[in-house]
Image (tube, rainbow, N blue to C red):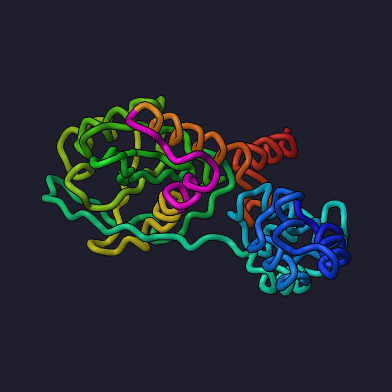
Amino acid sequence: MVNQDTIRLIDTFTSKIPLVRICQYLNISRSTYYYHKKHADHFNLNRIEQEIQQLCIKTKFLYGYRKIHALINKYLKCSVSKVQRIMAKYGWGCRIKRKRSHRPGNPFKQFDNIINRDWSVSVPKRKLTTDITYIPCGNKMLYLSTIMDSFNSEIIAHKISNHPNTQLALDTLNQLGYLNGAIIHSDQGSTYTSREFYELARKKGAIRSMSRKGTPADNAIIESFHANLKTEMIYTQAKPKGLADTIKCVNNYIKFWNNKRILTKLGNQSPVEYRKSVAQLNS
């Protein structure tokens, strides 16, 4: 590993030995030497900078400065503005997220927007949201259907298919038991306005709510999850190879999201940690 001690050692001998021979002996390239010499400030990190760097690497640059501050502040006290400055200085910010387009459909039955962007709830499985998104797989697409509990943003059901059809949504909803008056929110795509989905949701005792047409912001929490999945899955795992590997990567990411991915709105806990902590407080 090249560090500033290595650079100083090379500089000591360059007056007597050609640089190319020193680099060959140390098995490093000259470009590596020049890069480390030019960017010396990047490699002379103080303790807090080293800790922030290691946290960013450990979390694969998925978090912004607020979440990194929440993690480092557990054992090393510092201000959030200081973490922000350090991460900006070294370019350690989170990755850019992509947005997906909305798919319109032909309705069988539509419902009012009961949720109306109010996802707050004090107990689990009272306000649910569902959607289907695409997952690139080589030269084709897979489709992921998810159901999220707005109580803690936990993915409580999901299914992957080759087709974004009604059966995919039905298979996902069938993973849940009787919903006993819970609200399930969706967009106005033909999948969710179909007779089949209407009948299944009715049998499960769900109250239906739908986003306004062409307004994905009405279902922002699950739109955001799907954007996170497609962006962060690239950085948390090796690039999927083939159908089986893509499915495995998606399943692994959902486990990561539910059990490890901290969310600011949950007090920097993962969805499962938050659910358990609330249950413990109420017991």
> Where does residue 38 sit, x and y in percent of width and height?
71, 73
Q: Nearer the viewer, residue 26 or 62?
A: 26
> Where does residue 91 sit, x and y in percent of width and height?
63, 68
Which residue is painted at 32% across and 46% down in the image?
A: 133
Q: Quadrant of the C terminus?
A: top right
Above or below residue 50? Residue 14 is below
Q: Is residue 183 magenta?
A: no
User: Based on the displayed image, in which of its 4 quarters is residue 205 positioned?
Assistant: top left
Q: Nearer the viewer, residue 273 or 159?
A: 159
Above or below residue 13? Residue 180 is above
> Where does residue 62 sit, x and y in percent of width and height?
58, 54
> Where does residue 129 sit, x and y in percent of width and height?
39, 46
Which residue is painted at 62% across and 57% down in the image?
A: 63
Which residue is painted at 56% across and 45% down in the image?
A: 152
Q: Nearer the viewer, residue 193 or 74?
A: 74
Evaluate whether residue 18 shows in this view. yes
Evaluate whether residue 202 shows in this view. no
Which residue is painted at 67% across and 39% down in the image?
A: 273
The magenta-colored residue range is: 228-243
Q: Is residue 118 left or right of residue 91?
A: left
Above or below residue 94? Residue 107 is above
Main secondary structure type of the part rendered in magenta: helix
User: Based on the displayed image, in which of its 4 quarters is residue 102 positioned?
Assistant: bottom left
Q: Is residue 231 magenta?
A: yes
